[in-house]
Image (cartoon, rainbow, N blue to C red):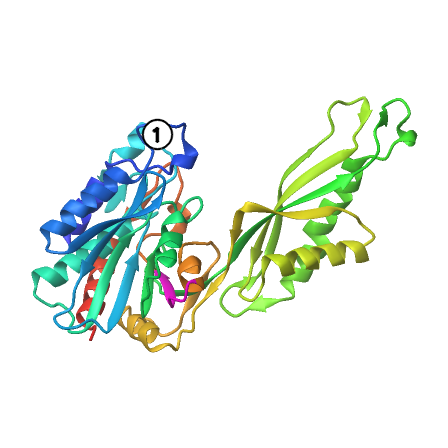
């Protein structure tokens, strides 16, 4: 599928860094250049194209393949256009040793290229489904707030199945963990450093809390296993307390990454940590950092549409993944969702991001075959 490779190279050369990662007005920021390019490509192929406003000055691109008769089903193909930031050279696609290198190659412009090319192949060969509408939805903002997928849900889009493009090594993923960021705060009493006994050290108290989170609480999480995802995790990523060495600190704050399993909620996790802190004889105020409160996702692999897609991919059993993506937003909005695409998450966000050309070609063939099989 040389056309998929060509399409991916063109996409990499159009920077679409999430605006949250750059100063206002930076020429590398925003998805619009990619959205315009995809719109033109899809229109030339004969698809119906529209832009859907999803955030201020930012739009999803929807390209629709209508069925031969009245639509009674819908399949959604949903990769995202935004990337993390990169160096100038990372926006110059390079082909070496059977790989395409460049920012977004696997996360997720590889998925964008394979999904759009698969739809274009169906049109070219006159294989439109009889009653299933196919919607290619190139989304904004997955890397930050998922405004693109949230806009789809807010506009009441429904589908029998959403295939969300992410680097899954060509495996159909039916479950992934959620991501919850928490802030814990300990309070003490300030005093002069020469008489620390007159104060109460909030950093010392927080050190005990951190030790408990990373040992006893983490061990307790390992006791609860999910068949596809393993166990939930906790990691303390930020700590700040005190103002200068000769003042006993009266406040200390940590920020915690808690990866959640299907069935866990933000409210439930916060209540669990608060209760177990109390039982451990520790005290800290706990709150959620709403900037990252992302639900886990689990779709029943026995659903007929999921089974059909898994068969197309030559896969008998579902797999899970540890990172979060737009699939959870769509699933929460009532669309049965799976995650699928070329590349490996190990290459995402790296200095030398790449995707294997063989995986691009295989993914395009599998998606094309699945679309051909639709009713």
Q: Is residue 334 magenta?
A: yes
Mark 1 surroundings within 10 Å by alpha-carbon count, few (fewer than 14), some (14 through 19), many (20 or more): few
Task: Classify the position of the N terminus by image quarter.
Answer: bottom left
Q: Quadrant of residue 11?
A: top left
Q: Is residue 97 left or right of residue 143?
A: left
Q: Judge by depth and name the residue closer to the eye, 329 or 297.
A: 329
Look at mark 1 in the image and give the residue it sits on.
Answer: 87
**Residue 347 visible in the picture:** yes
- Residue closer to the observer: 325 or 88: 325
Q: Is residue 162 above or below residue 150?
A: below
Q: In the rendered image, which quarter contains the C terminus?
A: bottom left
Q: From what the image shows, is residue 277 above or below residue 333?
A: above
Q: Quadrant of residue 17?
A: top left
Place of residue 263 in the rendered image (x, y in percent of width and height, measured from the top left): 56, 67
Q: Tell me if I can see residue 2 in this picture.
A: no
Q: Position of residue 169 (x, y in %)?
A: 35, 57
* Secondary structure found at label 1: loop
- Residue 61 in percent (x, y) is at 25, 49
Above or below residue 170? Residue 254 is above
Highlighted range, magenta:
333-339
Expressed as whole percent of the image width and height from the top left, the position of residue 68 reads 12, 70
Q: Is residue 266 left or right of residue 85?
A: right
Question: In which quarter of the view is residue 9 placed?
Answer: top left
Q: Residue drawn at (45%, 63%), measured in percent from left and top?
A: 332
Callout count = 1
Magenta stretch contains residue 26: no
Residue at the front extreme?
Answer: 155
């Amino acid at each position: 599928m040389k056309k998929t490779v060509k399409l991916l190279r063109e996409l990499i050369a159009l920077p679409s860094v999430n605006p949250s990662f750059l100063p206002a007005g930076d020429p590398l920021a925003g998805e619009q250049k990619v959205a315009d390019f995809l719109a033109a490509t899809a229109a030339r192929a004969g698809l119906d194209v529209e832009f859907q406003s999803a955030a201020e000055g930012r739009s999803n691109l929807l390209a629709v393949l209508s069925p031969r008769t009245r639509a009674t089903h819908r399949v959604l193909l949903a990769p995202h256009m935004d990337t993390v930031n990169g160096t100038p050279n990372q926006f110059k696609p390079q082909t070496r040793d059977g790989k395409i290198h460049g920012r977004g190659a696997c996360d997720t412009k590889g998925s964008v290229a394979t999904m759009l090319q698969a739809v274009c192949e169906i049109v070219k060969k006159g294989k439109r489904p009889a009653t299933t509408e196919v919607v290619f939805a190139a989304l904004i903002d997955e890397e930050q707030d998922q405004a693109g997928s949230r806009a789809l849900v807010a506009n009441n889009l429904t589908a029998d199945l959403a295939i969300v493009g992410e680097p899954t090594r060509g495996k159909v993923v039916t479950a992934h963990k959620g991501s919850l960021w928490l802030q814990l705060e300990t309070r003490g009493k300030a005093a002069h450093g020469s008489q620390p006994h007159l104060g109460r050290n909030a950093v010392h108290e927080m050190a005990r809390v951190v030790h408990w989170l990373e040992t006893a609480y983490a061990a307790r999480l390992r006791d609860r296993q999910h068949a596809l995802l393993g166990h939930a995790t906790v990691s303390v990523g930020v700590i700040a307390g005190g103002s200068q060495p000769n003042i006993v600190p009266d406040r200390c704050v940590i920020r915690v990454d808690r990866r959640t399993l299907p069935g866990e909620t933000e409210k439930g996790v916060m209540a669990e940590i608060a209760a177990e802190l109390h039982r451990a004889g520790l005290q800290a105020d706990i709150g959620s950092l709403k900037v990252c409160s992302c639900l886990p996702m689990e779709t029943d692999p026995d659903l007929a549409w999921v089974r059909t897609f898994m068969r197309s991919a030559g896969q008998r059993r579902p797999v899970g993944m540890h990172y979060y993506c737009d699939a959870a937003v769509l699933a929460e909005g009532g669309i049965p969702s799976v995650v699928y695409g070329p590349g490996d998450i190990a290459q995402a966000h790296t200095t030398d991001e790449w995707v294997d050309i063989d995986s691009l070609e295989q993914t395009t063939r599998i998606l094309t075959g699945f679309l051909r099989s639709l009713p």
